[in-house]
Image (cartoon, rainbow, N blue to C red):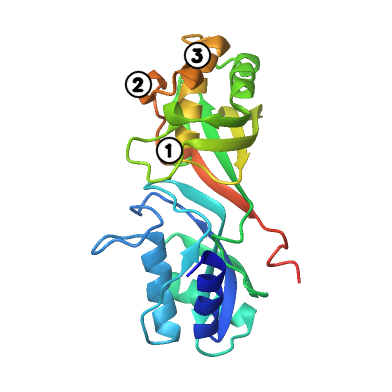
Amino acid sequence: MGLPEAMAQGRALAMYRYALKVEYHGAPFVGWQRQVDLLSVQGTIEAALSKLERRTHNIAAAGRTDAGVHALGQIAHCDMDQEWDAFRLSEALNYHLKPHPIAITACAPAVGDFHARFSAHERRYLFRILSRRAPATHQDGLVWQVKHALDVDAMQRGADVLLGKHDFTTFRSTICQAESPVKTLDHLQISEVETAGGTEYHFDVRARSFLHNQVRSFVGTLERVGAGTWSPDDVKSALEARDRAACGPVCPPQGLYLAGVGYPQDPFSG
């Protein structure tokens, strides 16, 4: 059975499908994906759904974030036996998600053969680095903190090398399960933002899909460029090496956010 047929069959088995926009703080969770006897975002939402319709639920999401990674605009879908008012469904879920740091910020009936993962054509990630000497307080757990300033122009020159279609083996985790290391990076823009708590460096990264740890590998490598340890040309050499050993340090997950997901038609626009 091909993918379109499988999607159609899966939809036919469920009477009502709803798209969910999900925001969460990743610190307490082992990641998005459900794991036996461990706290996951998926498992927590499915447990909340079981309070509304008392059965086993299996939701799907646009991307599987790792432990400690946050989301501002993760998209998931759930299949319900009965028809729900979308606002009432989101309110009920938010009630049963307490006290976990997960919020359903939008909910809408799915249109056509909508699938949170397979219908998506873009994933957008944000990574935040905070530069300051004093320990982070309000931003603790929400940024990767470094104590030195970074050269934004140098980092952007290194980032520009990564744009386009490449074999990204160097920036791919050794446990990545993707069939191919070849991906197309559409956008990687770095900006410097002055805040009351210090200087932040924001990495806006967009592509149709990503390899495991690809964004964190990019940011960890580019941070070395910003710190002056690497040059932009070193990023090019690492990319061309197609060797995981050539990658810079993989940065921690705390500063990474799944910021949004793009679809041919916005599931929440109607």
Name which residue type carries label 2: Ala
* Towards the viewer: 92 or 215: 215
Instruction: Please tell me whether residue 261 is drawn above or below residue 257 in the rendered image.
Output: below
Provide residue 71's location: percent of width, then percent of height: 52, 52
* Left or right: residue 112 compared with residue 257: right
* Tag of residue 104: none
CA neighbours of label 1 inside 10 A, class few (<14), some (14 to 19), many (20+): some
* Towards the viewer: 262 or 93: 262
Whichever of callouts 1 and 2 sits on the residue coming sooner in the sequence is 1
Marks 3/1: CA distance? Answer: 19 Å
* Cβ–Cβ under 8 Å for marks 3 and 2: no
Provide residue 6's location: percent of width, then percent of height: 50, 72
* Tag of residue 245: 2
Q: Which residue position is annotated with label 3?
A: 237
Q: Residue at x 65, y 16 (%)?
A: 153
The quadrant in which residue 47 appears is bottom left
Circle 1 SS class: loop
Name which residue type carries label 3: Ser
Marks 3/2: CA distance? Answer: 12 Å
Q: Which residue position is annotated with label 1?
A: 213
